[in-house]
Image (spheres, rainbow, N blue to C red):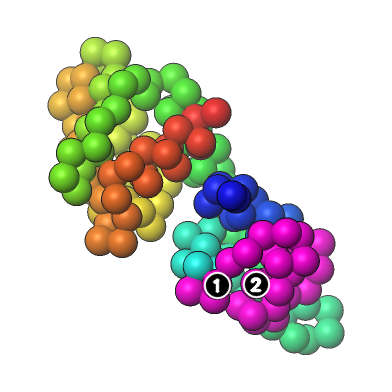
Amino acid sequence: MTTKFERQGTIMRLVQERPLHTQAEVAHALRANGIAAVQATVSRDIHQLGLTKVRNGDGKLVYALPGAADIRRTDELSGALRRWMGESAPSGTILVIQTPRGFAAALADAIDAATLPEVAGTIAGDNTVFVACADSTSPAELEAELRSLAS
């Protein structure tokens, strides 16, 4: 079974390799790469990846990767997670993350700056960050995504 991270990585690669005009074309390209995904999943992935539609050389709208600023924020979040994310525990609709003393605010700032659609917001103490999940995301899903970004 393909993980969300692998599926989204494949979508990003496909968007760079060829013009994809519709969600149906993205789903078809995924299937051609051995990844089964329904249109609703593709729609959610496109939103979470921050893909936009731009005009290609032929003047047609195609999906494109987010801008450099978005990529930089994700890179900064990955670095912050590697440095400061310790043990974590899902609790209700919140993901509780432990950090070394004094680093919770820095990690919370990096999470907020990344503007992940799965995150509603953060609260930081001295060594603990509470991450409130967006309505469509479970704390376990968010934990898996943050761990994959940290690796």
* Mark 1 surroundings within 10 Å by alpha-carbon count, few (fewer than 14), some (14 through 19), many (20 or more): some
Q: In the drawing, does residue 132 fall left or right of residue 56?
A: left
Residue 38 image position (x, y, % from top left): 55, 72
Q: Which quarter shows the C terminus?
A: top right
Identify the mark nearer the N-term, 2 or 1.
2
- Residue at x 83%, y 84% (from the top left corner): 58
| Residue beneath disc 1 | 38
Verify CB contact (< 8 Å) between mark 2 and mark 1. Answer: yes
Element class at badge 1: loop
Residue 27 is covered by the magenta coloring: yes
Label 2 sits on what residue type? Ala
The alpha-carbon separation of the residues under discs 2 and 1 comes to 7 Å
Instruction: Provide the residue span drawn in magenta.
Output: 14-40
Can residue 47 be seen at all in this image of the molecule?
Answer: no
Residue 37 is covered by the magenta coloring: yes
- Residue at x 27%, y 57% (from the top left corner): 134
Specify the label residue 27 is tagged with. Answer: 2
